[in-house]
Image (cartoon, helix red, strand yellow):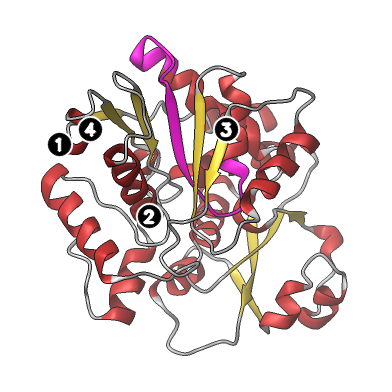
Amino acid sequence: MTADLTVRLQNGPSPVQEICPPVFAQGGLRLFIKRDDLLHPDISGNKWRKLKYNLIEARRKGFKKLLTYGGAYSNHLAATAAAGKAFGFSTLGVVRGEKVLPLNPTLMYVEECGMELKFVSRTNFRNKNDNSIFETIKINPNGYYDVPIGGSNCLALPGCAEIVAELNSQLDVLPDYICTACGTGGTLAGIVTGMEGKGTAIGISALKGNFMKNEVAGFLKKCSEKKYSNWQVFDNYHFGGFAKFKPELIDFINSFKKDYGIPLDPIYTGKLAFALFDLAGKGFFEKGATVVMVHTGGLQGVVGFNERFGGVLKM
């Protein structure tokens, strides 16, 4: 059964698309988009990468139920629910915040996939690593394979590292820069391990604060025997914090879709692309460099975002 699941999880590689924004052309740069948003229609982007080896491990250990956590619009909850439906796991999602009816499009979707939802207060959610949360929602966690918030753990890293091997094959050379958005830091950490000290990995934090570098460093220390220094995190493109935005970000995302035909989300990939355009304009990348932006998906949340904010994204 484990071998069968392993075969079914061999998806990809995701396509690579080159675009030529003037700000990159003027700097003698090449920009490629690694379209991980096209990996799977329902388990897209870095969520597929992170869940891949966790699902294999869950099956190997004989678990039939997955337990995980997320906010009301969580890409990770949506992907885990879809993965459970596709690969034969029952799923339970612990949602941060009180239940609000009608459910938003993300939570409606996860329930349609068969995920059971338990809602907890934000205070209790912060204690998700404490067994008290399981007393609150009245479950015994021992029967579940526990997938951490965002899917980020040591089993997530090798799935994300495969991005690098794919790029090396698709471009016939390792790019100078591989860039990704950061929510928990697991995707960037995986890319760093895959680069094996060559080139530079860039993370753009979607959250306010300067803690993301420590999160990534923590994954690398815990999950890899090697030490890497060829990476950095920018924490000044969060537009006010997680799930926050400003008009210039919305305008940028809409223009990007119009100019290049690639949809972005306002939580992660929109901030990533905005940052890379800004860095290119400021001369951060050396002339002649090849830059890859990893499109980590997250587009399922756009419907709910537009529902909340009046259809500001032209998708």
- Quadrant for the C terminus in the image: bottom left
Q: Amino acid at mark 3?
A: Trp
Distance Cα–Cα, label 2 vs label 3: 18 Å
Q: Secondary structure at mark 2?
A: helix
45 lies left or right of 194: left
Highlighted range, magenta? 168-187
Within 10 Å of disc 1 (Cα), the crowding (few <14, some 14-19, many 20+) is few
280 lies left or right of 258: right
Residues at marks 4 and 2 touching, judged by CB atoms closer than 8 Å: no
Residue that sits furthest to the top in the current view: 172
User: Residue 247, relative to residue 174: is it above or below?
Assistant: below
User: Residue 71, relative to residue 49: is it above or below?
Assistant: below
Quadrant position of residue 294 = top left
- Mark in the foreground, 2 or 3: 3
The residue under label 4 is 24
Q: Amino acid at mark 1?
A: Pro
Q: Position of residue 55 (x, y in %)?
A: 65, 42
- Which mark is on residue 22? 1
* Magenta highlight on residue 102: no
Residues at marks 3 and 1 touching, judged by CB atoms closer than 8 Å: no
Residue at figure coordinates x 32%, y 65% from the top left: 302
- Which mark is on residue 231? 3
* Magenta highlight on residue 185: yes
The residue under label 2 is 271
Distance Cα–Cα, label 3 vs label 1: 26 Å
First in sequence: mark 2 vs mark 1: 1
Within 10 Å of disc 3 (Cα), the crowding (few <14, some 14-19, many 20+) is many
Q: Amino acid at mark 4?
A: Phe
51, 86: nearer the viewer:
51
